[in-house]
Every structure is written in C-alpha cells, then in structure tokens.
Image: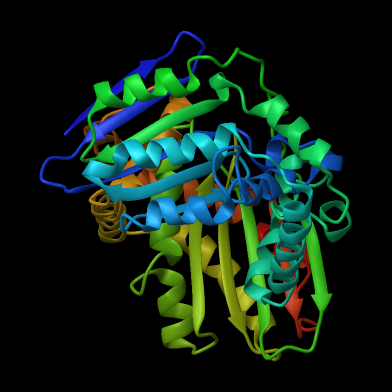
Amino acid sequence: MTVRQDQLKNGFRIVSEHMPGLQSAAIGIWVTAGGRHERIEQNGIAHFLEHMAFKGTERRSALQIAEAIEDVGGYINAYTSREVTAYYARVLKDDVALAMDVIGDIVLNPVFDPREIEVERGVILQEIGQAYDTPDDVIFDWLQEQSYHDQPLGRTILGPTEKVSAFSREDLSGFVAEHYGPEQMILSAAGAVDHDALMKMAEEMFGHLQPRKGLIPDAARFTGGEARQEKELEQAHFALALESPGYRDDAIYTAQIYSTALGGGMSSRLFQEVRETRGLCYTIFAQTGAYADTGTTTIYAGTSADQVGELATITIDEMKRAAEDMSAEEVARARAQMKAGMLMGLESPSNRAERLARLVQIWGRVPSLEDAVAKIDAVGTEDVKAFAETMAVQAPAALALYGPVAGAPSLTELQERRAA
C-alpha cells in the first residue's frame, strides 16, 4: 500500500492510498471548517451547512443526490466535528468518478433553497431536542463547555436553538465564502483508487477556485470548571475531564496508553475496581481525545444516586494509585490494545481515508504507520507512571454531573482529594 500526496496550484490538496485486492473505495472532501472556526453568533452553522449540502445543488435535487450514489449500491454521508466538516462516500471501484462528481457538486454548488432551509432547520432542532433527552450525550457537551469555557472549542457542534432558528441563506453562503477555499480542503481516498485519475478529477473540479485565507482559530485554553444539573433520572451521570496533550505533541501516545490502562477495556483498573469488584456501575470508561493544540482525558460513568459519591472518590483514588504502581504488564497490554485498534481499524478504506485527511490537516504530510507503531512502542512504564502522576494531582480538571447527583462531590472536593 502506497500513500501519494499532491497539491494543486491554488492550494487544494489530494492524498490517497491504493489498497490492493479491494473492490471498493472510500472518497471524500475534508474541510478545515468545524465548530471551533465559528464566531459566537455562528455557533451551529458549520453543522447546518453540512445538512444543507444534501438538500440540492445547481445540478441535482436532494433526491437525485441520494439516488446517484444508492443506484450503484454506494453510501454517502457527512459529519461535523469541532475541527473539520467531512463529506464522503463508499462505492465500488468503477464508481469512484461518480462519487467524486457528486461530492464535488454538493461541496461547490449548494443552492440553499429557502424552503429546504426551513425543512432542515426543523430537522436540526429535532436533533438538538434529542440530544437533550440523551443524558450521556448532553453531559459531554457540558463537560466540553467547562473544559474550554467561553471559547469556540467549548461550544456545542449543534449550536443553541435560538441561533439555529435564526440562520439565513446569507449566513450559510457567508460561512462558505469564509471557510471553503481550496487551501482549507483535502480530497482523501483509499481502497481501489488511482491517484493520477483523482488528480485529474480534482484539477477539473477544484482547480478554478481562488485561494483565500481561512480563519486561524485562537489557541485553546483549558479553563476547567463544574456543571451540575439535578434531574429525576434513573442514573446519575458523572464525567471528569483532565487537560492532556494535543495531536502535535508526542506525549499523546503516553496519554492514550494511560487512559487505555486506566479505563479502556474490561481488564482496565477502573472497570475491574469500580464495576467488577464493587458493582457500582454498568458503564465506566476512560479515553483520551485530541485536537490540533490541546486534548482531554475523559472519565465517564453512570451509577445510582446513592453511589455516585463513592464512585467519584474511588475514581480519584484509582488515578492516584495508577501513578504509584502501574505495572509493566498493564502498559504492555495497553500498547497492544492501542496498536491492534489502530491497525485493525485501518483495514477499512473509510477509516484509512479519514486518517489520511486528518494527518495532512495536522502535519501537512502522512507519517508512516511504522512511525506511529514505533512511537507507541517507545512509551515505557515510567513514562506512563509520570503521566499518571500529572493526571492524578496536577492537570487542570472539569466536571459535569447530570441526574440525581445531590450526593456527588464538587469539583473543589475532588481537587482536594487529588491533592491529599
């Protein structure tokens, strides 16, 4: 498998990886225009725009967009994150040119029909309402807001109801004009793809675009804080976030190995102590996520009202214990899980295309898998224990609680336990 990367004169980037033996391909456009690129009055517009891309172009109706891909047995979708909006498809190898044409069409030529805007506005408002009815979704929005308070990175991707209710056709067109320049776009493909053919299609579709400067978001600042909402629910939801490295910091590998050992699987410390030994919850996990310039290690659990206090304090105790006696065997197991998860995931062309796009966005190039594996293997037990010490005692923290949480300790109380 060979990664190839090119760039048009206007800054539009193309990256692909041919995967021998596959009869299908994943292809998409990744745009550096996510939630953190919105001004406060625009919060939610990147996601709204993603929805509108499928509601009709100058050449195709909404139905024709869907039929074009589904008539050949393919799949088309999109998503918005805090750093990127992606439009992608999975098709058989003979239909790559068709998928490229459809994706290019929805990215470049949306018509923003006022009637369709109103229809999709209703859909998104329903999506927001559904999120509020899903405690283990909304708690992570609150946690994000507390982690990066009063910053674009801390705002919800869906946006608040009042802003979504007011977005106009001009607002959508304005966001495209600001952020959908060739230098903000990456065409990424993997599977049964021909790079030279992709280059030719990219030149035909995107070569005419004029370069424009995209918004460079402000550097993230992990602020920390607490969000607590009492509500009559079956479970008390507990989420703790700790400042961690960003993608461009090699310490991200240590952070990910740490969170895997702490709460990444059935053999992890939190799962064994909190669920298996004490029976305090059904779900508990730890994970490390990253952005270009910051990251968070998050611990989440759902438990009963009368056990949330015990669960919270045991979680802190387990974090502190990990700094003292994390074993070489635990670190080796976490390294193996991390490598296996990465390599198994990359057997999918969709996952591989996404990885290529994200690496080009972050680094401007695609480091080899061998480099990534070597960096994972280079993380030793003492590295993880030192990182665990930082997480247990020093790292800034944010806390979100939802449900019957009267018995849960405050962030201040948890900080005091960390320092004890």
Q: Position of residue 147 (x, y in %)?
A: 72, 50
At x 75% / y 41%, what residue is drawn?
152
Q: Nearer the viewer, residue 254 or 324?
A: 254
The vertical placement of 199 against 314, above or below, is: above
The vertical placement of 172 against 406, above or below, is: above
The vertical placement of 257 against 192, above or below, is: below
- The answer to whether residue 183 is left or right of residue 358 is right
Q: Position of residue 294 (x, y in %)?
A: 60, 38
Q: Position of residue 353 (x, y in %)?
A: 35, 40
Q: Nearer the viewer, residue 245 or 7?
A: 7
* Quadrant for the N terminus in the image: top left
At x 60% / y 41%, what residue is drawn?
57
The vertical placement of 369 against 276, above or below, is: above
- Can residue 268 be seen here? The reply is yes
- Can residue 146 be seen here? The reply is no
- The answer to whether residue 22 is left or right of residue 3 is left
- The answer to whether residue 272 is left or right of residue 133 is left
